Image (cartoon, rainbow, N blue to C red):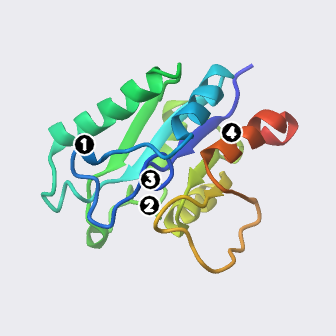
């Protein structure tokens, strides 16, 4: 049996976030325990994907070679723990471009679910911001907020299916220890 899909935000969820953007592999730094948590989920059969807004491309803060190098670092470090990201989707547009792929729109999430033939209602969306949650909610995903990023909402949130976690380790423990609630 295939376990449901997990869609993760990148900056502030998997790695340290920066107000001035992650512009190089040297600036990319995994959050404590994040890679180990993702490896545990992968080893237990979960499909792991990333959906990330990367307007730094449109702002000319970095190019595709640099973005690929950042993702290569993430993938390489995760592999050291025995984990794997099955796909990385990104939006290169500015907020004012009003594209369908930039979160809080759900275009990236739709593409990921289509590629993996996943039911959005069984898909877990993990992020650190309101825009992540809005994108997941509009598609009907199971929502998980981690309190590790710069954009964590400070006011109480009202989503019908929201679980809150301190960090990715708590999220992974939740899924691994509550298998009946994960489907």
Q: Which residue is mark 2?
A: 103
Residue for badge 4: 172
Q: Quadrant of the N terminus?
A: top right
Q: Is residue 164 above or below residue 67?
A: below
Name the residue beneath numbered marker 3: 107
Q: Residues within 10 Å of mark 3 (few under 14, many from 20)?
A: some
Q: Residue 144, image x and y in percent?
A: 66, 54
Quadrant of the rendering where the C terminus is positioned: top right
Q: Give the Cα distance between marks 3 and 4.
A: 25 Å
| Along the viewing direction, whichever of 116 and 64 lies nearer the viewer | 64
3 or 2: mark nearer the eye? 2
Q: CA distance from mark 4 to mark 1?
A: 27 Å
Residue shown at the point (54%, 40%) measured from the top left:
34
Q: Position of residue 12 (x, y in %)?
A: 46, 56
Q: Give the numbered dot on residue 26.
A: 1
Viewer-nearest of discs 4 and 2? 4
């Amino acid at each position: 049996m295939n376990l449901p899909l997990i869609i993760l935000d990148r900056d502030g969820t998997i790695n340290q976030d920066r107000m001035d953007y992650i512009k190089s592999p040297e600036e990319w730094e995994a959050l404590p325990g994040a890679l180990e948590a993702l490896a545990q989920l992968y080893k237990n059969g979960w499909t792991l994907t990333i959906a990330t807004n990367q307007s730094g491309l449109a702002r000319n803060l970095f190019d595709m070679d640099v973005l690929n190098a950042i993702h290569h670092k993430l993938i390489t470090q995760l592999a050291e723990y025995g984990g794997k990201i099955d796909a990385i989707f990104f939006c290169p547009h500015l907020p004012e471009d009003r594209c369908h792929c930039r979160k809080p729109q759900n275009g990236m999430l739709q593409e990921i679910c289509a590629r993996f033939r996943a039911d959005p209602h069984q898909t877990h969306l993990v992020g650190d911001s309101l825009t992540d949650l809005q994108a997941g909610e509009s598609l009907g995903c199971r929502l998980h907020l981690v309190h590790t990023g710069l954009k964590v909402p400070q006011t109480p949130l009202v989503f019908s299916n929201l679980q809150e976690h301190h960090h990715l380790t708590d999220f992974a423990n939740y899924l691994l220890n509550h298998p009946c609630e994960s489907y």
